[in-house]
Amino acid sequence: MPPRKSSPLDNVLGRLDDLDQQNLAILVQRLARERRLLETVFNTIREGILVIGREGVIDYANSAAAEMLGFMQKEVGRAVLWKRVPELARTLHLADDGGLRELSGISREVEISYPAARVLHVYIVPLNIEDPMPGAGEGTELRHAVILSDITEEKESARQIIESEKVQSIIDLSAGVAHELGNPLNSITIHLQLARRQMQRMEKGSRRDKVERALSVCADEVTRLDGIIKHFLEAVRPVEPDFADLDLISVLDESLEFLGQELADCGLTIDVELDSVVPIVMGDRGQVKQVFYNIIKNARDATPTGGIIRIRTSSDDQFVYVQIGDNGQGIDQNDMPKIFRPYFTTKKGGNGLGMMVVQRIMRAHGGRIGIDSRKGKGTVVTLQFPQKQRRVRMLGAGVDAEAPAL
Ligand code: ADP
Ligand code: MG
């Protein structure tokens, strides 16, 4: 970390012992004013902001956070976040002593029922606050900032990415164009094949080699274009899931059978430990496979040769969890909130649509996705699928498939 520039306030704090009564009073007033200003700013923000200690004790909460989680300012300093939002604690894999592990970022969607039924997106990032007065007894316990966004309404709307009719009409138009591109592309593919056949009749030699290279570049580019169009159409034209009883183990097995060779070719070890039986979920086989592919492929892209991709399953009384972990490059703290945005990518050839599609499919399945990452160490993606009986209850209660299960 670059050395922090010391502010005029730091300079004064460094000479506290030299200050007389009057200057001290001025300093305190100035600090109080600054604090009021910051407090007003933080209390105006729509997002909930908390600062928590390693064990989840809430050290600070802005008004939005207190309102979202239903507690009073006077409880700050005593209330424990894990107790306020048990579902969050359940998905965090806390250390044995109840403490938060050191990660560069955590992203979760959680449902809360108190003080109101809501779905919150929770980001947890470590806070690196330098102690302005080292040795003053404050200690340097690792603290975290927790940012809460209320996504209840967003989740209730049938398509999260479509914010207005205007956006929708642009999407329809571009989807139409993308679709239309399919025909000329097919025609180019056929003519490339014809040209290749002609080429094979040419005499062997440098001219033929040149033509061959040119044709193969064209063919590769056509494949790439085809991929771009396919991904684009998948992203903007979500297909309703065709629900059936699903055994996630068999879906995982099939996905791995398909991707296994590719991972081995990249020099990656796959370490799979699946429960022999997991409860049945309701899902669209093709779409769930797509979720596994996208996440496993991201793990592959992030992990250098010799790395390991770990896949685990587990379940509790309501959900089935599938965890896909890698020991690759991890996700930068600043990138955590962007992962699900369309077209966000850090890869040269990336399209930035994979995680958006994953999130959309998981939501359509009444499920959730959580990400734990540590820069330079790796990433674990946790998929949470509601078990069939929970899902049947949800749908039976007349709740839309997109709505949170409460
Ligand atoms: P793409 O794979 O085309 O970049 P995605 O939507 O699948 O698009 O992923 C978006 C970004 O999220 C990636 O570019 C990468 O920065 C980050 N990401 C996703 N999964 C991982 C992972 N397992 N490890 C590191 N970074 C990841
Ligand atoms: Mg991807």
Image (cartoon, rainbow, N blue to C red):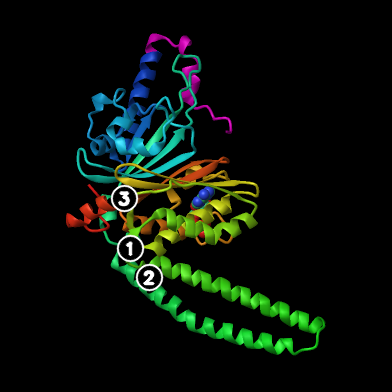
- Percent across and percent down for residue 188 are 57, 84
Q: Is the CB atom of the residue marked by disc 3 within 8 angstroms of ligand 1's nearest atom? A: no
Q: Are marks 3 and 1 in contact (CB under 8 Å)?
A: no
Q: Between residues 84 and 249, which one lies in front from this camera angle? A: 249
Please give the residue where the numbered disc 2 appears in the rendered image.
171
Q: Residue furthest front?
A: 276
Q: Residues within 10 Å of mark 3 (few under 14, many from 20)?
A: many
Look at 23% across and 31% down and name the residue there: 71
Residue at the spot of label 3: 386
Q: Earlier in the sequence, mark 1 or mark 2?
A: 1
- Which of labels 3 and 1 is toward the front? 3
Residue 155 horizontal side relative to residue 258, left or right: left
Residues at marks 1 and 2, CA–CA distance in whole angstroms? 9 Å
Reply above or below: 156 against 187. Answer: above
* Mark nearer the N terminus (3 vs 2): 2
Determine which quarter of the picture holds residue 262: bottom right
Q: In the rendered image, is residue 3 in sight?
A: yes
303 displayed left or right of 325: right
SS at mark 2 in the image: helix
C-beta proximity under 8 Å, tags 1 and 2: yes
The amino acid pointed to by label 1 is Ile
Mark 2: which amino acid?
Ile
Residue at 44% from the left image edge and 17% from the top image edge: 138
Q: Residues within 10 Å of mark 1 (few under 14, many from 20)?
A: some
**Horizontal placement of 304 versus 331: left or right?**
right
Q: Looking at the picture, how far across and down is residue 67, in whole percent?
A: 23, 37
- Kindly check if marks 3 and 2 are in contact, taking CB atoms under 8 A apart as contact: no
View extreme (right): residue: 205
Bounds of the magenta segment: 1-22
Q: Which mark is residue 162?
A: 1
Q: Secondary structure at mark 3?
A: strand
- Type of residue at label 3? Pro
